[in-house]
Image (spheres, rainbow, N blue to C red):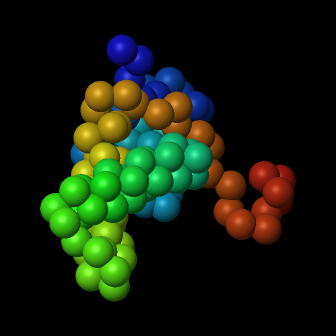
């Protein structure tokens, strides 16, 4: 199992150092982030599990939608956090929006 590593200095990054949407490497202070596609997949899977669970509990209509949305946030967050331990994402360098990654 591959662990999360800083793209700039290759030091291992623990889950306790991760902040959203971006954070500094504990070693070199480079701005890094968890890829948005990783977060999207975890949240989408969380929503699917939450809605399926609510449906299987017998909920329907507006109650299904409201409970599904509420549980989606909870399950998505749990999957994102647990996923970083079970299947760590490749950490990317963070580029500030609108910067195009260019140095000034």
Residue at 26 percent of width and 41 percent of height: 82
Between 97 and 79, the residue placed more toward the observer is 79
Classify residue 52 as left or right of residue 2: left
Q: Position of residue 15 (x, y in %)?
A: 29, 41
Pick the quarter of the image with the N terminus: top left
**Residue for point 82% across, 57% down:** 100
Identify the image quadrant of residue 88.
top left
Residue at point 41%, 18% (across, down): 2
Q: Position of residue 16 (x, y in %)?
A: 25, 45
Residue situated in front as seen by the camera: 23 or 61: 61
Residue under the point 31% across and 69% down: 68
Q: Is residue 23 visible?
A: no
User: Could you say which is closer to the camera, residue 73 or residue 27?
Assistant: 73
Asked if residue 93 is positioned above or below residue 4 in the image, the reply reads below
Q: Is residue 82 left or right of residue 21?
A: left
- Number of labels in the image equals 0
Q: Is residue 52 visible?
A: yes
Give the quarter of the figure containing the C terminus: bottom right
Q: Quadrant of residue 69?
A: bottom left
The image position of residue 73, as x and y in percent, is 32, 66
Looking at this view, is 100 or 27 the one in front?
100
């Amino acid at each position: 199992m591959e662990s999360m590593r800083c793209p700039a200095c290759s030091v291992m990054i623990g889950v306790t150092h991760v902040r959203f949407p971006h954070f500094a490497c504990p070693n070199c202070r480079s701005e890094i982030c968890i890829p948005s596609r990783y977060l999207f997949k975890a949240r989408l899977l969380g929503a699917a599990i939450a809605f399926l669970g609510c449906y299987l509990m017998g909920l329907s209509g507006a109650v299904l939608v409201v409970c599904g949305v509420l549980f989606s946030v909870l399950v998505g967050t749990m999957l994102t956090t647990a996923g970083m331990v079970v299947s760590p994402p490749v950490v990317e360098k963070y580029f500030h929006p609108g910067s195009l990654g260019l140095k000034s």
